[in-house]
Image: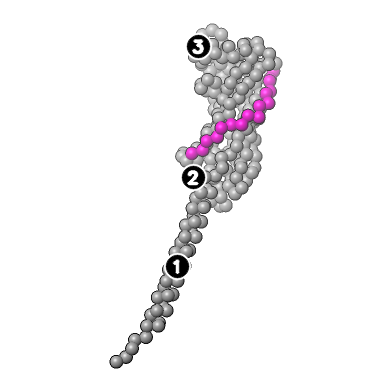
Amino acid sequence: MSVKDCGNHHDGRKKLIRRLIMAIAGLIILLSLVVFLVWAILHPEKPGFILQDVTIYNFTTTTVPPYILTTVTQLTISSKNPNDRIGIYYQKLDVCVTYRAQQITVATLLPPSYQGHHDVAVWSPLVYGNAVPISPFLQQVLSQDLNVGSMLVNVKIGGRVKWKVGTWVSGRYRLDVNCPAYLRFGNPTGVYPVGPAVKLQLLQRCHVETALGS
């Protein structure tokens, strides 16, 4: 009667267990790397926008019906990428001005650009509204603001961005920027501006929102 040698069987079992442990450890490391990359890609820090200045060439409204508003304004807007390893592609951004929740200029398209780590981009778009119809209530409030010599408008930027990590580029994210601008005329007359142009230094930080979407 022979005795079976279980040594080889035992060693093979230990090797299988070691391989299984190594495979599980490798899988955990891989999953951790994927989770980190997903976090880095899908949760980047939002760019910071600043409305640096506003130059107003025309801002007038009619005093009899039908009420219309005509504006010609140049804006200086800067954006900084705060991320260390994530670049930002700006795609199809447009800017407009609103007053009391009504859009008073047409949307002006900003040139597409890429922003590297900690880079700063600056745009100086000209926005205008030619004979924009406004309600009698809005005309009354606007006339009061012009007579007082100050008014609050909102510079709004909307469009799409993509995040870039190494050679990988994310899908499109929606970008919405709101820059409140409190304009002080200094010399109220009811018609603004008095001279050929008035430039106001603001350095106003903007509220920025990003969301996954088209």
Specify the label residue 171 is tagged with.
2
Instruction: Measure how far apart labels 1 and 3 are at the Cα level.
Output: 76 Å
Q: Is residue 61 visible?
A: no
Q: Quadrant of residue 19?
A: bottom left
Q: Position of residue 151 (x, y in %)?
A: 60, 18
Q: Position of residue 7 (x, y in %)?
A: 40, 83
Mark 3 and mark 2 in contact (Cβ < 8 Å)?
no
Q: Secondary structure at mark 1?
A: helix
| Rendered residue at 37%/86% (across/down) | 5
Specify the label residue 21 is tagged with.
1
Q: Earlier in the sequence, mark 2 or mark 1?
A: 1
- The residue positioned farthest toward the bottom in the image shown: 1
**Residue carrying label 3:** 136
Q: Position of residue 127 (x, y in %)?
A: 59, 25
Instruction: Measure how far apart labels 2 and 3 are at the Cα level.
Output: 44 Å
Q: Is residue 156 above or below residue 186?
A: below
Q: Quadrant of residue 116?
A: top right
- The residue positioned farthest toward the left in the image shown: 1
Q: Is residue 133 above or below residue 127?
A: above
**Which amino acid, mark 3?**
Pro
The magenta segment is 196-211
The answer to whether residue 18 is left or right of residue 113 is left
**Which amino acid, mark 2?**
Gly
Specify the label residue 140 is tagged with.
none
